[in-house]
Amino acid sequence: MSRLFRHPGAWINGPVVLYTFGGFGVGVWMLTRTEIALNVVGVLLVAHTLVWSAYLLHDCAHHAVFTAPTANDRLGRLLSWVNGACLASYEGLKRKHLRHHADRLDVLTFDYRAVLKGAPAWVRYLVLCLEFAYVPVVELLMRGLVIATPFHHGTRRERVRMMLFTAVRVAAFAALALISIKALLLYAVAYFIFLHVLRFMDAFQHTYEIFVSRSASPAPPDPRRTRRYEYENTYSNLVSTRWPWLNLLVLNFPYHNAHHTQTGVPWYRLPALHRALYGEQEPQVIPSRTLLANYHRYRVARVLACDYGAVEAVGARATGFIGAVGVSFLTAV
């Protein structure tokens, strides 16, 4: 009989899945209550389960949960309904993310920078003002394009699929609004927190080049993009080096160098892999606490920046690390 799970210890995914789906439902219920304390806990619970749904979906895309690819894909699709990634094609999400690993590039299917630079000045100014106010406009724009693209470049089947899936999502939000407008507004707050958490993690994990292409074909080969290049342009932005368990808040996603070394290793085995590969003195580790100031300082500049800045070899290494934006693995246009 074939083994159900790909790796030993996969039982831990059971509680994670239960918490993600169950916690999301309980959190939404808390948003509908009149008690302020329950509302606050509900916002945090919804935001956190959204985060875990994204990073567990990431493991599914790498077939790191089950032995059978189809089982990973089924769980990944279910998780995508929690965080809204269901509006994009799951196959497209997976293909785009795996190209990121294979091509050693940040592969984008839509160059929002070019659009903003070519837009009327008032549009560009409005976007930058909203980003200054911590409204993640670029992430919302990318999700809007996921919805719009099938109606411009897609097939009839893709358009029908998008209309059906969008209708289901809209109906769910309408039902929540009928129960409580306050709950809908609080859900928006939780969703913004979720977007900022994912955006912060994504912002400081690479200094890759940006490659824009709608094609499913690999990027043109470049002898510079070796395994060494991948390692030197990948960073592990650990939530905490002193208390490693805090990295579980984001399902160990910050162990990014270890992940890029062995992409099929699941989230719960990444800390051990990181220690085995790098010990306690890994130079590519940049703790998140040193990057929070950059996330704030460059929040407007990174929107139109032509690259992600630079990480120095010594000293205050991350001072010029601007970071990425619009590279979420949950958006595939």
Image (cartoon, rainbow, N blue to C red):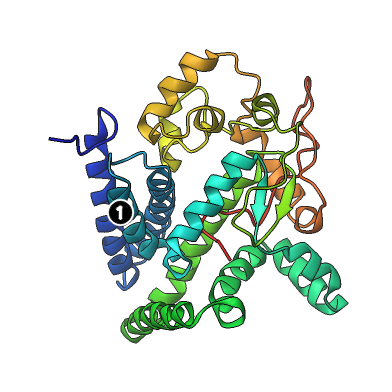
Q: Nearer the viewer, residue 91 or 266?
A: 91
Residue found at x 31% / y 83%: 179
Residue found at x 49% / y 66%: 189
Residue found at x 24% / y 37%: 5
Q: On the picture, is 109 further left or further right than 50?
A: right
Q: On the picture, is 315 further left or further right than 143?
A: right
Picture quadrant of residue 101: top right
Q: On the picture, is 288 further left or further right than 110?
A: left
Question: What x and y, as percent, mark residue 54?
Answer: 43, 52
Q: Looking at the picture, does residue 305 appear above or below residue 280?
A: below
Q: Which of 47 and 119 is in front in this view?
A: 119
Question: What x and y, as percent, mark residue 105?
Answer: 67, 43
Q: Nearer the viewer, residue 245 or 146?
A: 146
Q: Which quadrant, please, contains the N terminus?
A: top left
Q: Which quadrant, please, contains the C terminus?
A: bottom right
Residue found at x 52% / y 13%: 279
Q: Looking at the picture, does residue 89 appear above or below residue 223?
A: below
Classed neighbour count for the residue bearing mark 1: other residues with Cα under 10 Å, few (<14), some (14–19), many (≥20): some
Question: What x and y, as percent, mark residue 162?
Answer: 45, 78
Q: Mark 1 points at which residue?
A: 75
Identity of the amino acid at label 1?
A: Leu
